[in-house]
Image: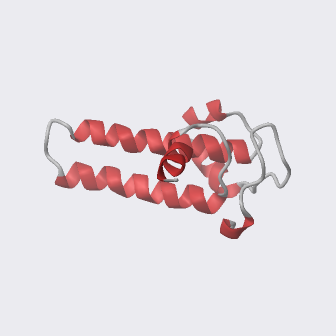
Amino acid sequence: MLLNKLKKILLFDGRINKKEFVISFIICFFSIFWIRDNIISKYSDYYKLIFLYLYYSQSVKRLHDRGLNGIYAINPLSFIGNLADKSNDEINKYGNVPDKIFTI
């Protein structure tokens, strides 16, 4: 069960809604700055890379929810679109509609 949840978070396939994207962004954003300010070691850059990977995986899933290709995640302005644009409420080629429990 835990392995399935971890796999769902780490992989780039599937869809997430806006609330899940916002929560994952906040966790990644503050974790990167907390690491920068509190962890002084030769491994701190690796920790930052882990959280950047998590942010991009979640950003790609949010783009999939909007019906767009995940390659747009490299565009810095895609973050604004992920926050502003509403979800595609139909099944698209990236998967089923995310749960309505977490929608904003």
**Residue 58, relative to residue 12: is it above or below?**
below
Q: Is residue 48 visible?
A: yes
The residue at 48%/53% (across/down) is: 2
**Residue 37, relative to residue 7: is it above or below?**
below
Point out the image quarter for the C terminus.
bottom right
> Residue 93, how many percent across, how many down?
80, 37
> Residue 31, how many percent across, how many down?
34, 54
Q: Is residue 25 left or right of residue 12?
A: left
The single residue placed furthest to the left in the displayed view is 41
The residue at 66%/49% (across/down) is: 81
The residue at 74%/65% (across/down) is: 100
Residue 84, located in which quarter of the rendered image?
bottom right
Q: Which scheme is used to colour this image of the protein? A: secondary structure
> Residue 73, how many percent across, how many down?
59, 37
Q: Is residue 55 left or right of residue 33?
A: right
The single residue placed furthest to the top in the displayed view is 71
Residue 53, located in which quarter of the rendered image?
top left
